[in-house]
Image: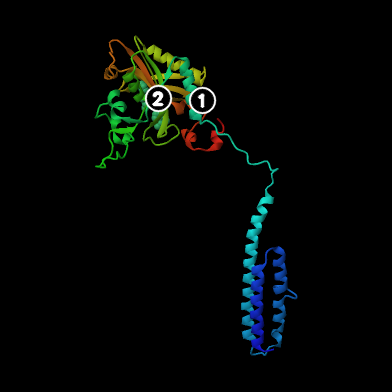
């Protein structure tokens, strides 16, 4: 046999095989084409390959090269067909593969976050003590966050490093906004309520506050406070202590030990810090005191006629003590294994 004839046969075979693989429509015609062209025993490629022995010795290298090329062409056509059939096959089988008797994917109901649960619980207890719930804004102005709370301009509590001032006002100068900030305590709500309400006042306000505190087991840069305010005639420090003690035993249990320590806040005089005992340590859970006459005056009350007390308690620390959560950061990691326990 001549080399030329050998090459012609291979070209023709590759062409036929390509056409056959391109036109096959399913597994059966694909298998038929595979057997016909590349079947191991009597496939056409094998038959031509067997003729290699009949060629002259000189022609064999060129013939071998052509054999490899043709084999690669046929192989490529076969693989393309296989891919095409796999894709269409998958699409066709998707329908029947759906098993309507399978149980389906279970949907999980969400839960109320432990801090939100705590807030509701605290409102409930304070409601029974006669305190109404009010709300206040989280973005505050200088007046409510500082001035009206008896915190003068040069007071360290105003330091920009101790507060989250709003970065940009959108003003044309691009100057930072030093007039508005995220409130650093819920005591701002005391002022807002007194500005708009005639005494007597007996309210609580619960919400988020923000401080650039580094997070550790008992601190977080965003946390919640419950503010309380009672203004009337002849309100006493003894009443303040009774209210806080009743609240603490209602929320933390009859056996809780709490103590009051002298302290300082610019907007109360005298002032105290309140601690509870937990695992042998005293942990601070709030500040309180008799409302400073300057504050009463700044909202238009007459300190000769009315007085009162105020307190601000850390909601997270109360929640932690009740539920034995030893690290405040667990409340905000969004780990469902933790949150599902509440
Ligand atoms: C105040 O914020 C005062 N406004 C409380 C007050 C209100 C005093 C009314 C007098 C009259 P203080 O900064 O101590 O006080 O915070 C009160 C409580 O918030 C703390 O006892 C603590 O329980 C909680 N707290 C403070 N900082 C953090 C923080 N970074 N993370 C979590 N809880 C905090």
**Circle 2 is placed at which residue position?**
135
Label number found at residue 180: none
Label number found at residue 322: 1
Quadrant (top left, top right, bottom left, bottom right) of the N terminus: bottom right
Residues marked 1 and 2 touching at CB (< 8 Å): no
Identify the residue at horizontal 51%, vertical 31% (top origin).
113
Q: Quadrant of ligand 1?
A: top left
Residue 246 spot, x, y in % from top left: 46, 15
Q: With 176 as the anchor, is 336 left or right in this view?
A: right
Q: Quadrant of residue 82?
A: bottom right
Residue 125 spot, x, y in % from top left: 48, 18
Q: Which of 196 and 291 is in front in this view?
A: 196
Label 1 – label 2 distance at C-alpha: 25 Å
Q: In which quarter of the image is residue 90?
A: bottom right
- Specify the farthest residue to the right: 41
Q: Earlier in the sequence, mark 1 or mark 2?
A: 2
Residue 268 spot, x, y in % from top left: 32, 19
Tell me: residue 5, above or below residue 114.
below
Q: Quadrant of residue 42?
A: bottom right
Tell me: residue 322, above or below residue 245.
below
Identify the residue at horizontal 70%, vertical 81% (top origin).
48
Identify the residue at horizontal 49%, vertical 31% (top origin).
326
Q: Residues within 10 Å of mark 1 (few under 14, many from 20)?
A: some
């Amino acid at each position: 046999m001549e080399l030329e004839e050998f090459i012609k046969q291979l070209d023709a075979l590759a062409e036929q095989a390509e056409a056959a693989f391109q036109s096959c429509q399913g597994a059966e015609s694909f298998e038929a084409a595979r057997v016909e062209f590349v079947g191991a025993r009597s496939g056409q490629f094998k038959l031509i390959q067997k003729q290699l022995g009949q060629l002259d010795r000189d022609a064999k290298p060129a013939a071998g090269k052509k054999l490899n090329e043709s084999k690669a062409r046929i192989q490529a056509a076969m693989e393309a067909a296989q891919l095409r059939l796999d894709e269409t096959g998958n699409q066709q089988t998707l329908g029947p593969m759906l098993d309507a008797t399978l149980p389906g994917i279970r949907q999980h109901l969400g839960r109320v976050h432990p801090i939100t649960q705590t807030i509701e619980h605290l409102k409930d207890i304070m409601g029974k003590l006669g305190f109404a719930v009010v709300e206040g804004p989280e973005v505050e102005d200088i007046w409510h966050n500082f001035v009206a709370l008896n915190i003068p301009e040069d007071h360290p509590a105003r330091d920009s490093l101790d507060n989250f001032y709003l970065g940009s006002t959108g003003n044309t100068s691009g100057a930072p906004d030093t007039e508005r900030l995220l409130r650093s305590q819920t005591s701002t709500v005391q002022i807002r309520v007194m500005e708009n309400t005639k005494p007597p006042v007996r309210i609580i306000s619960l919400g988020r506050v923000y401080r650039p505190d580094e997070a550790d087991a008992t601190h977080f840069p965003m946390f919640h406070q419950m503010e309380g305010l009672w203004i009337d005639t002849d309100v006493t420090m003894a009443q303040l202590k009774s209210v806080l003690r009743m609240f603490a035993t209602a929320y933390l249990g009859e056996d809780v030990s709490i103590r009051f320590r002298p302290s300082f806040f610019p907007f109360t005089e005298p002032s105290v810090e309140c601690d509870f005992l937990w695992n042998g340590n005293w942990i601070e859970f709030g500040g309180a005191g008799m409302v400073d006459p300057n504050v009463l005056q700044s909202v238009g009350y007459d300190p000769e006629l009315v007085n009162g007390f105020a307190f601000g308690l850390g909601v997270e620390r109360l929640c932690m003590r009740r539920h034995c959560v030893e690290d405040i950061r667990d409340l905000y990691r969004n780990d469902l294994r933790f949150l599902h326990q509440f």
